[in-house]
Amino acid sequence: MRRPSVSGPGEAAGLTGGLWVFSALRASALSRPTGEIAHARLTGCRQVESAPNLTNLVHSPELFSLPVDDNDLARLEACLREAVLGEDDFLNEVASHLIEAGGKRLRPTLTITAALLSPEVVSRETLLGGVAVELVHLASLYHDDVMDEATRRRSVESVNARWGNLVAIVAGDFLLARSAEIAASLGPEIAGLLAATLARLCQGQVSEVRSAYQISRGEAQYLSAIANKTAALMATACRIGGLTAGLDRPAIDELTAFGEAFGMVFQIRDDVLDIIATEAELGKPPGQDLAEGIYTLPVQRALRDRVHGPRLQKLLGRPLTEPEREEARSVVAASPGILAASDLAREYALSAAKAASRLRPADPVVAGGDGRSAERVGRLATALSEMSLQVADDLEQAAESARVRFEALAG
């Protein structure tokens, strides 16, 4: 979610809808409903006959690959598709738009990976937990694109560009409502956890809105905002997997710590790529944050640089034309800010890797009581650790390559 460029009824409706869903989640946490409706509807979580067709929608680059079985991913995809279907064909089309466009499905994949630490097979509850998290993420994209006035998302036309802002906002609220329904079916702890996560997302959004176009925005403010907006949902994805799999509390807490740290790496990487990547690589125009006055970590570090900072300060603090945006991108990309951001991402990656390494089973309850289970847990912990470090490695390489490229362009 980003800073709204104009104020209008659509934005108010989106905020009101989000607050309503948040209240519903809190109520579900206290009432412990049975969730029979959600379970009855989502039959695709059980088995899938056309697994190859569904897994093709999961565009997860090798960088984010985890040892999750294709059949489980197919079950997840079927469950996700069914979760947004109702009696209104038009709403079904709108709510399914970005699901049909594909995606990494990183958050629900983390949920499944966390659950695999248990010796049991991936349960229906785990898949539902992953879907609930993904629906919150998708809803945030619908609302983001309205506030950003974006026209492209995942290489397809954005929902707001195709159907208008009001439809996009209401469809995003619908996705949140479906997430709440599923969370309620999984019991009060998961419902309460998802409600608290949604509150953190809102806090991060408010912080970002308030700091728009402020070149004095502090690094601590930035880190707090991305912890709430991105890391919180990653942590929740991991924690839900541990909860649905019945892991012990120390293991669940380590998974949560991993998700929080990895979420920081992921968002810093995303913010760097918004500066240095192309539209073809991103699936949307680059430099969106700069255009909207959201000054992320690489920009903040560039502003502090004695060589590039003065030029950048003259450009920022106000809306940018497209040529000015490209100039600002070039200044930041050629500055030490990109490499400095990748260095901090490395620190968070190391924290994530340490949390994952602590998952190695010493307790027979976590290990499943036999040597094969212990070996499996060690393998999964290593996969999580290596993914974090590989993301940091990839970011460092991209940062260095971009620095050379943009310096050459600058002459």
Image: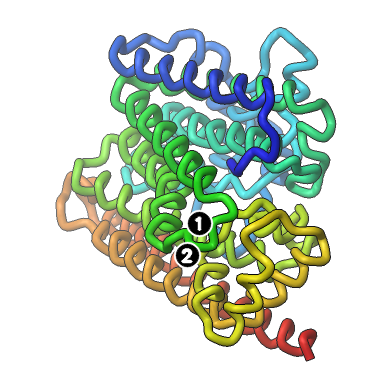
Identity of the residue drawn at 20% across and 41% down: 248
Q: Nearer the viewer, mark 1 or mark 2?
A: 2
Q: Nearer the viewer, residue 39 or 132?
A: 132
Point out residue 288 in the picture as x, y percentages from the top left corner. Answer: 69, 55
Number of residues whose C-alpha sits closer than 10 Å to that of mark 2, classed few (under 14), some (14–19) or many (20 or more) = many
Say whether disc 1 or disc 2 marks the residue closer to the N-terminus.
1
User: Helix or strand or loop: what does disc 2 sit on?
Assistant: helix
User: Compared with residue 117, is residue 6 higher up or lower down, i.e. above or below?
Assistant: above
Q: Are marks 1 and 2 in contact (CB under 8 Å)?
A: yes
For the residue labelled by badge 1, is the local secondary structure a helix, a strand or a loop? loop
Kindly identify which numbered label has been placed on residue 387: 2
Say whether residue 382 is left or right of residue 277. left
Residue 407 screen position, x and y as percent? 71, 87
Image quadrant occupied by the N terminus = top right
Quarter assignment of residue 152: top right
Q: Which residue is drawn at 82% across and 40% down?
A: 157
* Kind of residue at disc 1: Leu
Quadrant of the image for the C terminus? bottom right
Looking at the rendering, which quadrant does residue 14 occupy?
Answer: top right
Amino acid type of the residue tagged 2 in the rendering: Met
Residue 39 percent location from the top left of the image: 49, 15
Mark number, residue 66: 1
Q: Is residue 81 positioned above or below 233 on the image?
A: above
Is residue 219 in view from this perspective? yes
Left or right of 362, for residue 253: right
- Foreground residue among 317 and 128: 317
Q: At 54% across and 73% down in the image, what residue appears? A: 303
**Mark seen at residue 290:** none
Image position of 58 with respect to 88: above or below: below
Q: Which residue lies furthest to the front in this view?
A: 314
Q: Residue at x 26, y 40 (%)?
A: 247
**3D distance between C-alphas at marks 1 and 2:** 8 Å
